[in-house]
Image (cartoon, rainbow, N blue to C red):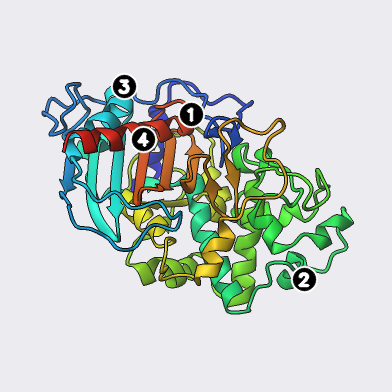
């Protein structure tokens, strides 16, 4: 851990504190994201540039050597993906994939980036570029853990759905009753909000940015508890409002039903069964192996997000998590996975988005048939998608590029196309 000195170092990466008027980052093109669209100046302005040569096929200079592993697969799968589109089983050129990703990230100033591609339950490719910690001259590797931001919501959603499978949580019953919180509430409509409505962001709770990004509270449990005193923005079930509050309340529900701390619940129920590692991280005290993300002074968003966005993990961990929600999921009944992918009945935007994105339960559903989640925090961009062609792709970034996390989606499309064309 880097302690107080490390905190000062991370702050030094940011030349100007973030604006107090932070806006939602947007997934696809217009959806309100986990946290904030970072408004600080270039966070990599003080990051030393390595003179080492990257093993990527990109001709641009990167911050440090990339590390990658890839395989070329020509085996045929008899199992189509959940969308019914036949899996692509052709060869995959990892160098070509990396060149596209690097050009959109470290080559334009990001501190580090990691990628992972999984196909048919097998690791097809992993890579890393840049510096895990530039002040310790530590290069990023495929084992570097990055902030997940809202991709963290997938972990919370899976645990809730497991308890629903077991009959310990009722999706269509009020969450307050199951949390054993009887009120009275400042807004009596809170008593009617169901677990499903929390998971789908149609509860009526506000975005509550002040709590999460302006030091309104100190912890995610306080953020959840403060929501019980809110006045709702809309009747439950009638409007979509992306809010981290929903998933902090789900975190409290997990603790109540299981009798265990939230992090223990996720580790025992989600991480260990599929052999992945992740941990909740604070804003400034970085463990060895965690990517350094630039943070402005006074921030505490990692502590306040918790179940909504406080995890760190490797790109391969994230890809394995998303891939575990395809057919024959080791974590959930097939009907539960299908239920998570049912689009909300209310518009996510008015007028409806041209690209057709929507939300399920803890999952983003994209217009091209892919599904997964994106995440954005200061100096953090994260995305994982289960594609209709059978590939699961994760990209995790420490840095400011691309400006909007949704811009990584066409990067993935181009990188996959390049990997196939170059094979």
Relative to 326, say whether 70 is above or below.
Answer: above
Please state which of residues 238 and 273 is positioned toward the viewer in this rendering.
238
Residue at 77%, 48% in the rendered image: 204
Determine which residue is flagged by label 4. Answer: 413
> Pointer 3 and pointer 4: residues touching (CB < 8 Å)?
no
Determine which residue is flagged by label 1. Answer: 404
- Packing grade of label 2 (10 A; few <14, some 14-19, many >=20) is some
Sequence-first disc among 3 and 1: 3
- Packing grade of label 1 (10 A; few <14, some 14-19, many >=20) is some
**Distance between the alpha carbons at the discs numbered 3 and 1:** 14 Å
Determine which residue is flagged by label 3. Answer: 108
Residue at 61%, 49% in the rendered image: 218
Sequence-first disc among 2 and 4: 2
Q: Secondary structure at mark 3?
A: helix
**In which quadrant of the rendered image does the C terminus lie?**
top left
Q: Secondary structure at mark 1?
A: loop
């Amino acid at each position: 851990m880097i302690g107080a000195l490390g905190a000062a170092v991370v702050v030094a990466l940011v030349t100007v504190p973030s604006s107090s008027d932070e806006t939602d980052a947007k997934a696809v093109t217009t959806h309100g994201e986990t946290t904030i669209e970072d408004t600080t100046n270039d966070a990599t302005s003080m990051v030393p540039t390595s003179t080492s040569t990257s093993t990527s096929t990109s001709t641009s200079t990167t911050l440090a050597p990339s590390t990658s592993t890839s395989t070329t697969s020509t085996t045929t799968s008899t199992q189509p993906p959940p969308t019914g589109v036949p899996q692509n089983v052709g060869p995959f050129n990892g160098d070509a994939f990396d060149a596209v990703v690097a050009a959109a990230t470290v080559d334009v100033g990001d501190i580090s980036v990691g990628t992972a591609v999984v196909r048919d339950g097998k690791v097809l490719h992993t890579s890393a570029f840049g510096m895990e910690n530039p002040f310790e001259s530590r290069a990023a590797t495929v084992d570097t853990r990055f902030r997940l931001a809202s991709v963290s919501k997938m972990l919370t959603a899976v645990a809730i759905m497991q308890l629903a499978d077991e009959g310990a949580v009722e999706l269509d019953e009020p969450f307050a009753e199951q949390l054993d919180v009887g009120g009275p509430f400042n807004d009596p409509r809170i008593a009617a909000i169901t677990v499903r409505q929390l998971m789908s962001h149609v509860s009526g709770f506000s975005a509550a940015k002040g709590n999460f990004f302006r030091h309104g509270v100190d912890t995610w449990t306080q953020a959840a508890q403060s929501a019980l005193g809110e006045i709702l923005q809309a009747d439950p079930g009638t409007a979509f409002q992306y809010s981290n509050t929903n998933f902090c309340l789900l975190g409290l529900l997990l603790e109540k039903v299981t009798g265990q701390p939230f992090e223990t619940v996720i580790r025992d129920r989600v991480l260990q069964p599929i052999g992945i590692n992740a941990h909740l991280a604070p804003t400034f005290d970085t463990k060895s192996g965690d990517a350094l993300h630039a943070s402005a002074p006074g921030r505490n968003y990692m502590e306040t997000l918790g179940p909504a966005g406080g995890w760190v993990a490797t790109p391969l961990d994230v890809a394995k998590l998303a891939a575990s929600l395809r057919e024959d999921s080791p974590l959930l009944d097939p009907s539960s996975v299908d239920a998570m992918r049912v689009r909300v009945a209310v518009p996510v935007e008015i007028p409806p988005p041209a690209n057709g994105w929507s939300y399920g339960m803890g999952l983003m559903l994209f217009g091209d048939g892919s599904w997964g989640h994106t995440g954005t925090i200061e100096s953090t961009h994260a995305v994982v998608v289960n594609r209709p062609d059978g590939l699961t792709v994760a990209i995790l970034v420490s840095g400011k590029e691309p400006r909007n996390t949704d811009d990584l989606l066409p990067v993935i499309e181009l990188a996959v196309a390049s990997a196939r064309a170059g094979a």
